[in-house]
Amino acid sequence: MRLLILTATFHPLIGGAETYAFQVAQLLAARRHQVTVATDLPSGHQPGEQIDGDPAGVRVERLSSYRTTTESTIAWEQMAFGLLPELQYLVDDFRPDILLSNSLDTAITAKMLALGADIPWAAAFHEQQPEAEPLGAGRLRMVYETLRPDLVLAGSAFYAARALHWAPDLATALIHHGVDTDLFHPARREPHVRERYGLTREHLLIVCAGRLKHRKGMHNLLPAFAEIHRRHPETRLLIAGSVNSASRAYADQLHAQIGALELDGVVTVDETVPYTGMPALLAEADIVAQPSLAEGLGLAVLEAMASGTPVITTDIPGTREITTRSDIALVVAPDQVPPLAKALDQLVTDPHVRKSLGERARAHVEEHFSHARMADHTQAALADLITASASRRTAPSNAAAAHVSSQAEPAPHAGRSLQHATAVPKALLLDIGMTVIHPSSTVLGEELRQAGHRSPFEPDRLTAALVLAAEARHLPLPVGISGDDKVALAWGRALGVPDPIALRAFHTCLRRPDLYSDVDPDAHVALRRLREQGIRLAAVANSEGALEDELAATGMRGYFEVVIDSSQVGVEKPRREIFDIAVNALSLSPDQCWFLGDGLVNDVLGARAARIALPLLYDRYDLYGHLPATASVNRLTEVPDAIDRLRRPSS
């Protein structure tokens, strides 16, 4: 592919967004894709200047002529469109076939570029709390709802949830940020790092890396370190970060705090460390402390763990996706000094704990967060997007409508992602409602008529609208209404039914015991074939306690070795614990299992968070055909078909 990456900041600046763009560019170029990065000219550098350390094989264009204005230039026009002449020249010269933008601030320009060049647009976002900025909600609505990237590459569940919050039907692929475990490695220790800061081997070096922003929690680290330094005078603290995209005020606050705590000469704040200098710094550190108050994922934590350095971090959503085991890092409450000081003291005083923690942490990153894994999934997602975009340009305008209305034939892309599966699972975990047993269109139609809606609907339209509406349960808005009400309103609006009628009809449907009574036409055939193939089956569903009875009433209980009803185990999807319960009941590991369900959040994102080998979306009505990076099937029988293909000797 010919990939153009649009990113406001890039190497030599450091930060999560810059690291992500650097890695994607470098990894895809190494796989012989042609990659160009369009970015800003950083302060202190001249136009056309080559900057040491740029990713190998990548063309980096640092734009600067937009800054040149004349008396006739309208300032607002320059702010809105000043980049376009340089980008037009770059597009004409490079001729990309896909665009990847790397932040909210590039979204408007990215949309113009994608439309002008007629290429698909993928977007990655790294901002932590943009809604707190001026007009933040408006900015998010504009990007997700109005501009609508063709695909959002979410580096963590935090970012995936935000995308689905603002646009529930937006194509979103959860691909965890990865770390180059060869670059960030214990062997990267270099003596010149300590020499640079006037340190010797007798000093115990604590490092904190990240932008100088309040959410990084460095203002809590300083008093915690001061307490430790009084007891352990050999300790030194290095804060490596810059004020890029941040306010200078916080950096000034840190310097004032260092003086007030009498830590001058003991604590160093270095704003000049480039990304290429981080591997040696993290490997040379004795301890890395990342006391963040909020993170999208916590890339600095991953890099430190990959370096084999013991890490102290905080219990926040972004880092919980990393610290899934209790023996790979010390995790403390956020925004509190005493627990942070206690954790520092534990590692400072016990070198054996530091060693074992660092070794386990590195093994964890190698297994779950390698940059090779990220590259595999990113490459596949972008390639699928190019293919899907080309198909849309050549398909008849009414193809989508005709496709949804017909269940007789599978979708053209049916099972498109199963072709990439390489290993036969030992078990398949299945959702039940809307996957194996469907809502009765007869019941739905009857209750709509009873509630006052007279116009009939096609049966498939009633149930397809409910599949989409089910995702609304996970939205925090509107505030003050139940999850059932959110689903009811979304269902009614998808059908064009007034809110009061939809609410009345939906709640009546929920009280009917025959609501879930339509067995999938392929269910018995698919489940029987899977059992004959030796695949173990587990039902995993959010239910009110009737799951066993529903399976028995439809003659399907005998297929399932394990039945996990959320009301009985006390946890619901998408929480990873319910998947863990099922996997443990089978005495297997997540990487030996596939999962199949109809829900993007409950099933796909939940299974991904639980490290299930292959989360599959059952897209019965081809509602999500525009999601190129989501593994999906349109018929249950495609799963045993795929297993047969995997077991067939290659010719």
Image (cartoon, helix red, strand yellow):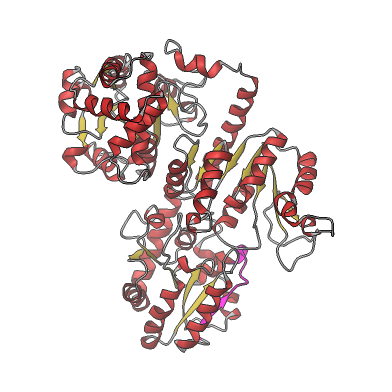
Residue projecting furthest to the right: 71
Q: Give the vertical position of 55 relative to 118 (above or below).
A: below
Q: Is residue 331 left or right of residue 21?
A: left
* Image position, residue 157 (x, y; %): 42, 47
* Image position, residue 544 (x, y; %): 18, 34
- Count the labels in the image: 0
Is residue 342 visible in the rendered image? The answer is: yes
**Quadrant of residue 645 within the rendered picture:** top left
Residue 273 falls within the magenta-colored stretch: yes
Residue that appears at 35% across and 35% down: 603
Point out the stretch of residues depicted in magenta. Answer: 266-277
Q: Give the vertical position of 134 relative to 401 (above or below).
A: below
* Image position, residue 205 (x, y; %): 47, 77
Residue projecting furthest to the top: 408
Q: Give the vertical position of 615 relative to 411 (above or below).
A: below
Quadrant where the image shows the N terminus: top right
Residue that appears at 31% across and 21% down: 530
Q: Give the vertical position of 351 relative to 605 (above or below).
A: below
* Image position, residue 289 (x, y; %): 43, 70
Q: Is residue 213 left or right of residue 98?
A: left
> Which is more toward the observer, 258 or 199?
258
Residue 164 falls within the magenta-colored stretch: no
Is residue 148 visible in the rendered image? The answer is: no
> Which is more toward the observer, 179 or 518?
518
